[in-house]
Amino acid sequence: MIGTTMHPETASLRLELEACLEFETLLADLSAKFINLPAERIDQEICDVLPKVCEALGLDGIALWESEDRSWESLVLWHIYRTVEGPPVPSRLSAAEHFPWSLGEVKAGRTIVLSSMAQLQGDATTDLPAYRHFEIKSVVDIPLVADRGAPFGVISFLRIREERIWPDRLVKQFRLLAQIFAHALLRKRADFVLRQSEERVVLAMEAADTGLWTLKAGDTRFWCTPNVLSMAGLPPGDGIEVARFLGLVHPEDRSLVHDTINRALESGQMQSVEYRVVHSSGQTRWLASRGRRRVDRDGHTHSIAGTTMDITKRKLVALELEKEKALTEAVFDSVPGLIYLWSPEGKLVRWNRQHEEITGYTAEELKGLRVETYFQGENLVRMRREWERVFTEGRGGGEFDCTMKDGRTVPFVLTGVRVEVDGKPHLVGMGLDISDRRAAEAHLTDMAQQLQRVTRAAALGELSGAIAHELRQPLAGILSTAQAGELMIKGDSCKCSEIAVLLGEIVADTKRADSVIRGLQDLYRKQDASFETLEVGALLRDALREAEKDELLTGAAVHTHVDSLGNVAVRGSRIQLLQVIANLLRNAAHATAGVADIARRIEIGAETNDGTVRIWVKDSGPGIDPTKIDSIFQPLVTWRSGGMGLGLAISRKIVEAHGGTAWAQNIPGGGACVGFSLPMVPQAEGLKRA
């Protein structure tokens, strides 16, 4: 074998070709690793490849920095690898403080190539202290840029042990490596931003009780956020089979959901659906889903994506509101009259079903009907007055004659109250047909008039009977006196003085009869008699004198009980009260008419009791029939033969006109006690005594 010697230039070229081949192999390997590498593994892969790059290119270290923000005030050290020990490098560095000149070059997108620190001249010398601090002898700084955008960081290729000349070929290789790292870091950054955005969206969705989901065209499985599965009553996960999901949907809603999914895949419009899902526990929840189709670059359906929200609470409230509304509508329509809501402009806004039936207008005709349609003439004037009251004072109403569609006039009681609807005042109220009430009132008025006529006739009959009853005594007195005078004139011993006395008695009896008639007239006309304060003892004594004068008590033993009264007084008409007492004495005399003179006894007296005076007459007769004792003060009721049944009735009327009460009772052992009670008054000056 013949030995050969390689020319030096050939050997150098060969070494250069081998180095290029080695770098291209490294570059291809890095590109293959990063092109489909998941974002979460990029940092680890960079850490793994930096030692290989340093070894392949003869470097002492590599550092990757990223700007914290667009101001570049701070650089964050993401990765560093050094083959030799050196001063510690901070994780965050103020480039403007330590490398101001280099920072300006990198931000401008220019590459810095320093084979020796002696190359730093002029303004660049500001960076020399920092390079010396970190023991850097040579460096190449290449801005990290992607797709011709603004730099977002810098990669530094370092020589620490000794200086090194950086040939153009090597700098170009550095730039290729910088592009690979820049793309990897940008993809990681974009993935980080996307994850942050997704997390914010998910948090917002969860806060709104909303989940996200996606269904690819032709796929049989939903991707969804965990809360969507929770809404469906399923354990956490990242998806669910379409068939299983449809199986959870309420049978009544299943076809609706299935059709909505198909429409979303076929249509570009947003689709929405509300449906029920049944959990394994049997609980039913209401969900609302919205979704829209997404297409690829060729316009073909790629997937549908959307949101799902649990609307159970809202739906249950809505269902309750619907029930309440239905109940309100039922009550509204069941009211037997008009219910209405008028706008401030006088247009009908809402009404009940009876409104249509009563007025004869259809629902279409009632919509927007003017309030003036129902009123004519004076009713229209009064309606406008009440309308103004409602909107100024808050309420109004009254009785109105309303005109129906067919021209009929129907009386109504209408009410109105001001309410706020949609921020505007309205009038709400109801109307009741009072036709029946009006007819009843007319009938009652007619009946009252008839009753008044009958009552008047009865009163006249009662008055005539009362006059006849009460005039018997004074007329009997006039007759007996006149007869006595006639006998005296026929005799031989007639004296003028005696005739004068008889004529005086006739005049007194005549005046007494006139007073009785006037008192009865006042009583039956409901007119007040002339009342005065009367001493009770004197009143009773006057009554006894009148009775003795008329010989009512002849043959009877009369006992009085008035001495202990003192000056007890009442207010009343003297003539009328004497008339009452005379009636009581007359009844007592008649009651004892059949009793032997020795047992015939009449008592008259009075007593006070709790602010009243009780005046009574007792007799020793047979007493009052117990079946009639409660009704003897009624007209035409009598318990003795020959009685008219008017005396006690008239007496009761007189007593009640004086604010008192009449009463009667039987006495144990025989006899009766009949009397009346009157309010007692304090004795005053001018008291009438006799």
Image: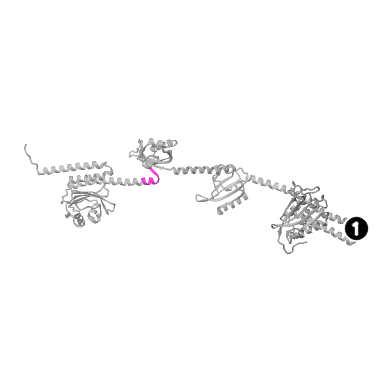
Numbered disc total = 1
Q: Residue 540: x and y, percent?
A: 77, 58
Q: Residue at x 17, y 43 (%)?
A: 20
Q: Main secondary structure of the magenta part?
A: helix
Magenta segment: 202-211
Q: Residue 222: x and y, percent?
A: 36, 38
Residue 426 vs residue 481: left or right? left
The residue nearer to you, when weighing 506 against 183, is 506
The residue nearer to you, when weighing 540 against 271, is 540
The residue nearer to you, when weighing 364 against 664, is 664
Question: On the rendered image, what quadrant is the N terminus found in?
Answer: top left
Q: Residue 331: x and y, percent?
A: 55, 43
Residue for badge 1: 488
Question: On the rendered image, what quadrant is the C terminus found in?
Answer: bottom right
* Residue 524 is at least partly visible in this image: no
Residue 228 lies in the magenta stretch: no
Q: Residue 616: x and y, percent?
A: 75, 55
What amino acid is labelled 1 in the image? Met
Residue 571 vs residue 288: left or right? right
Residue 225, by quadrant, is: top left
